[in-house]
Image: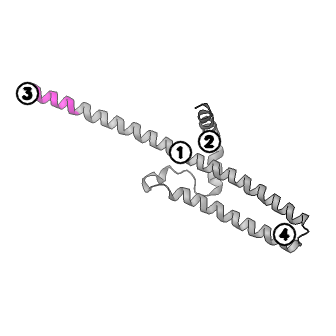
Amino acid sequence: MDWFFYLLVYMFGYITCKTFYFMNSARISINMLKSAQLTALLVLARSMEHFSYSRAIRLHHMQAAKASEHNIQAFTCVFEEELVNYKKKSIKEIIEAHPQVFRPFVEFKDWSTGMRHLEDNKDLLELIRTRSTND
């Protein structure tokens, strides 16, 4: 009878250890997922800065070359349309890259909520950045 209790205690300990290991692994996975989301959003925000810079340079060159107002307007319209499509597609791709089981952990649905999420987690981004520069 004692062997039965020893086996029972061993099984209880084994299952408890596996449960805590699983919970710790799940917590780490979710934290890594959130970190990856923030990094992707930061890269997209920086790409928007470069898009804006390229737009300003292109407009400057068009004005220096004395392009017609119609051409400048056409460039601006096409550029804005491409920018909107880029924003929608990039956020959609980030969301679709998540397996279905992790979709509830995506805290943004479109560009504006993504940038709000990025703004809300500035401190975490700064922590990630300082850790990466210290390594």
Instruction: Give the Cα distance between marks 2 and 3.
Output: 57 Å
Q: Is residue 33 above or below residue 89?
A: above
Disc 2 target residue: 121
C-alpha separation, residue under disc 4 versus residue under disc 1: 41 Å
Amino acid type at mark 2: Asn
Q: Earlier in the sequence, mark 1 or mark 2?
A: 1
The residue carrying pointer 3 sits among few (fewer than 14), some (14 to 19) or many (20 or more) residues within 10 Å by Cα, namely few
Q: Choose the circle earlier in sequence order: 2 or 4.
A: 4
Label 4: which secondary element: helix
Label 2 neighbour load within 10 Å: few <14, some 14-19, many 20+ = some
Q: Badges 4 and 1: C-beta atoms under 8 Å apart?
A: no
Mark 1 or mark 3, which has the lower sequence index?
3
Residue 18: horizontal and vertical position, in percent? 31, 36
The one nearer the camera, 95 or 1, is 95
The amino acid marked with disc number 1 is Lys
Residue 52 x/y as whole percent: 76, 56
Residue denoted by label 3: 1
Q: Which residue is mark 4?
A: 72
Residue at 62% x, 34% y: name it.
Answer: 133
Segment colored magenta: 1-11
Q: Earlier in the sequence, mark 4 or mark 1?
A: 1
Instruction: Tell me if label 1 and label 2 are in contact, CB under 8 Å.
Output: yes
Q: Is residue 77 left or right of residue 33?
A: right
